[in-house]
Amino acid sequence: MEVAAPARLAAGCIRRAPPQARWAGPIGGSGRSRCPARSYLRSRETVKTVVCYGPWVTEVETDRLVLRPWQSEDLAEFTRLLTDPVVTRYIVVHTPFSPQDVAELSDRTLEQWDRNGFGPWAAIEKATGRWVGRIGLDELADWPGPHKVEVGWELHRAFWGRGLATEGGRAGVRYGFETVGLERIISATMATNTASRRVMDKCGLRFQGELAMAGTTVAWYAIDRADWKAGQATAAAPPTGANLLGAGGPRSTTAFP
């Protein structure tokens, strides 16, 4: 969920950057670590230290998607996405996104990558190379709770109904716990957005409640690292009493991805 004025709501194989490009991993299980964030500090000379999250990762792949860091070149597709009134009917509370609004949101996405070493991905369809949308972890500075990293998704209509939001969302959850080292991941949407709420359920997040925010009622979901790990272990375990050795050999019981 992205909140901006005027009132807005908005794994696969991991390819890492060279070691010199990475920051230190999580400290003490908190999901945060100290890092240079050089370009961030250069633009804010009065800042002495910056709290950052896990190591820099260049790309994540799922069965059907390449999830790569956000680039300035994504602005054109992002503008086309967020000026589609059907796409934004559960994102925009009042006035539609203007091109300037979208540009500011894209800039904030780039700043997250610069500051934290992660942020929303640009999702690319493997089979065609087409730009699917924006998926992944998003730090919500204005979220009222202590855990401010959301997993979210905004996809072009052509890719709806194919399970791609779930596929990318699950990759984001896995990446948030295994690579970034988060303790909890949230997700929020308008309470009336039943489709997005179903994706949250499929990604393992559980309903926490509703709250008034940005002029509407928001439903929010969350999953803790311990619960996610327990779910992965359960999914990977062979069925009790089942014969896994059929004529074709052992059947895979590997959990996502």
Image (cartoon, rainbow, N blue to C red):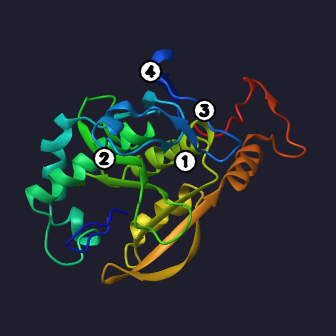
- For mark 3, does the 10 Å Cα neighbourhood hold few (<14), some (14 to 19), or many (20 or more) residues? many
How far is mark 2 from mark 4, CA to CA?
Answer: 19 Å
- For mark 2, does the 10 Å Cα neighbourhood hold few (<14), some (14 to 19), or many (20 or more) residues? many
How far is mark 3 from mark 4, CA to CA?
Answer: 13 Å
Indicate which disc, 2 or 3, sits on the residue closer to the N terminus.
Answer: 3
How far is mark 2 from mark 3, CA to CA?
Answer: 21 Å
- For mark 4, does the 10 Å Cα neighbourhood hold few (<14), some (14 to 19), or many (20 or more) residues? few
Splitting the image into 4 quarters, where does residue 39 fall? top left
The disc labelled 3 sits on which kind of residue? Gly
> How far from the left and from the top, in percent, is residue 151?
46, 54
**Residue occupying image coordinates x 60% and y 57%:** 204
Q: Label 1, secondary structure: give it.
A: helix
**Residue occupying image coordinates x 25% and y 35%:** 71
- Image position of 55 (left or right of 6): right
Q: Are marks 3 and 1 in contact (CB under 8 Å)?
A: no
- For mark 1, does the 10 Å Cα neighbourhood hold few (<14), some (14 to 19), or many (20 or more) residues? many
Q: Label 3, secondary structure: give it.
A: loop
Q: Which residue bears the numbered disc 2?
A: 109
> How far from the left and from the top, in percent, is residue 46?
35, 45
The disc labelled 1 sits on which kind of residue? Val
Q: Which residue bears the numbered disc 4?
A: 21
**Residue occupying image coordinates x 55% and y 63%:** 201
Indicate which disc, 4 or 1, sits on the residue closer to the N terminus.
Answer: 4
**Residue occupying image coordinates x 51% and y 28%:** 23
